[in-house]
Amino acid sequence: MSTLRHPLLLHLVIVVVAGAAALPARACPFCSAVSLTFAQEIEQSQAAVIARLVEPPPAGALKPRADGPLPKGKFRVEQVLKGGSLVADAGHAGPDGKPIEAIMLDDKPVGSLFLLLGIEPPNLVWSSPIRVSDRAVAYLEKLESLPAKGPDRLAFFQQHLEDADDPLARDAYDEFAIAPYEDVRGLKDRMDPARLLGWIENPKVQANRRRLYATMLGVCGGAAEAERIRLILAGLDRDGKNLSPEQAEVRSGLDALIACYVTLAGPKALDLVDRLFLKRQEREIPFAETYAAVMALRFLGEESTVVPRERLRKSLRLLLEEPKLADLVVADLARWQDWEVIPQLVAIFRNAQADNIFVREPIVNFLRACPLPEAAAAIKELEKIDPEAVRRAATLAGLTGALAPAQATTDAGGPGATPAVATEGAEPEDDNSGASLPAAPASPARLEEDAALARQVPDVKADEEPTDDEPAPATLAPSPSRSGKRLLWLVWALAVAVVAVASRAALRSRGAAAATR
């Protein structure tokens, strides 16, 4: 059961993610880093060297069923990138230095170059080796001299997007994925729209990278690029013919493509977005495409001023006409103060059936956020219909409300504080749960009652696919960047999410039983 195809699980996952951290706006809000960047790995290590393989593990030790300890190769240090004194103290420096021994699980030719990362001096424990080319060595040498942030830093990595040396292409993508969105805007005059469009139209480009290129094209493109993206959204090639199954891959990364098109074409572009992805009564539209459109609208509402909020609200309201999907947009409408939909939401709450009962909690939190007296009156009215839904909404919102001050304390400079540059007005990513809305905390007795119910329900598993076809290189475990209290809050959030799964499952069972009577 895929999380994205199941609104209930999607809602709960978002509660946990939104409560875990208030993330800065990234250069690609639709992207996620595949792995730590080389710069992050080196920063988190105490020593980093380029070393040459001088003695590979015995061939027999590399067999899948080989007995004995994990195989190790021996490496001679060629160049120190970080921690020169530590490398020397461990005896690895110089032509007569002793070789580094590191676990090596695949066969590579003698003489190959590798990046090795060390921790725990004085003896140093070394990571699994990461093979690098001569070009990659030159790339790694330049990292230390780059600005810590800003467009000039991204300008260097832009040169290596879709690099023929795949580790460099992957690292360049990851650098963009973790950078503040404002930095990519500052790179506008140094981008090449034609090259970006060429990558977008290449069906062999990975979906998450296509998202990045669409985001960048939205910054630097023009009318010609907007027209081509319009054809892609409509499933057409340059000649106006339907895309072949192989060509259809260019529509992966749809959320970023939609945002790119609207950014370039302006508010009028939303008419096409509404027709293709949101007006589900007119034709069958895959849920994944509708969800992608919602993600694009959130980005446009939070990170862009191209489209007025009122026009974005109009598009989001279309999903209220399909109650099974209303929970995707309820929190967005609350955050954007669209109080005109109160009567429609009350009607959805009243008419909710077993297959969309989960919409009730977001509606309650919408009403809690609304300052109008009719909202408070509606809560009292709806509590008579389903008091459990009102209680669960308070429980989930109360939890995330408690997480917020913990996050503020951590980020203010405590032991787990991490510097970040946030875009003004940015919201937690993918937050459609109402997590940012005001709420009263739930009582411990009620939480325990929910926990008892949760213990009767088996674990829910998802089957999400990885977002990158290439495996991430083996790295050292990252150093902790959050405080222990933060971790406890995250575990607590997950526990409450499981409670909500149990509660909703019980309600669905009850509703199904009632329907058969």
Image: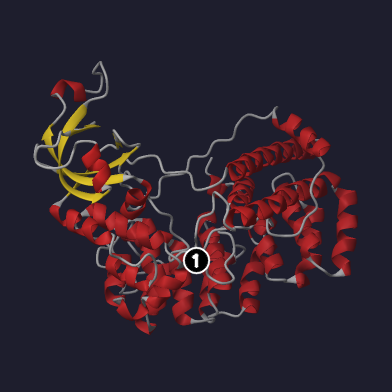
Q: Residues within 10 Å of mark 1 (few under 14, many from 20)?
A: some
Above-or-below relation of 126 to 411: above
Q: Is 295 placed left or right of 433 in the picture?
A: left
Residue at the extreme bottom of the image, as rendered: 223
**How far from the left and from the top, in percent, is residue 493?**
65, 43
Residue found 84% across the figure and 64% down from its top? 375
Q: Is 99 placed left or right of 316 in the picture?
A: left
Q: Pick whichever, 4 or 171, lies toward us.
A: 171
Residue found 76% across the figure and 39% down from its top? 507
Q: Pick whichever, 276 or 192, lies toward us.
A: 192
Q: Looking at the image, what colour scheme do you see?
A: secondary structure
Q: Pick whichever, 120 or 58, lies toward us.
A: 120
- Name the image quarter holding residue 388: top right
SS at mark 1 in the image: loop
Q: Quadrant of the C terminus?
A: top right
Q: Is 275 placed left or right of 96 in the picture?
A: right
**How far from the left and from the top, in percent, is residue 345?**
77, 62
**How far from the left and from the top, in percent, is residue 324?**
67, 54
Asked whether residue 377 appears in the rendered view, the answer is yes
Amino acid tagged 1: Val
Q: Quadrant of the N terminus?
A: top right
Q: Pick whichever, 12 or 478, lies toward us.
A: 478
Residue receiving disc 1 = 421
Q: Is 222 placed left or right of 57 in the picture?
A: right
- Name the image quarter holding residue 157: bottom left
**How far from the left and from the top, in percent, is residue 128?**
27, 37
- Name the image quarter holding residue 71: top left
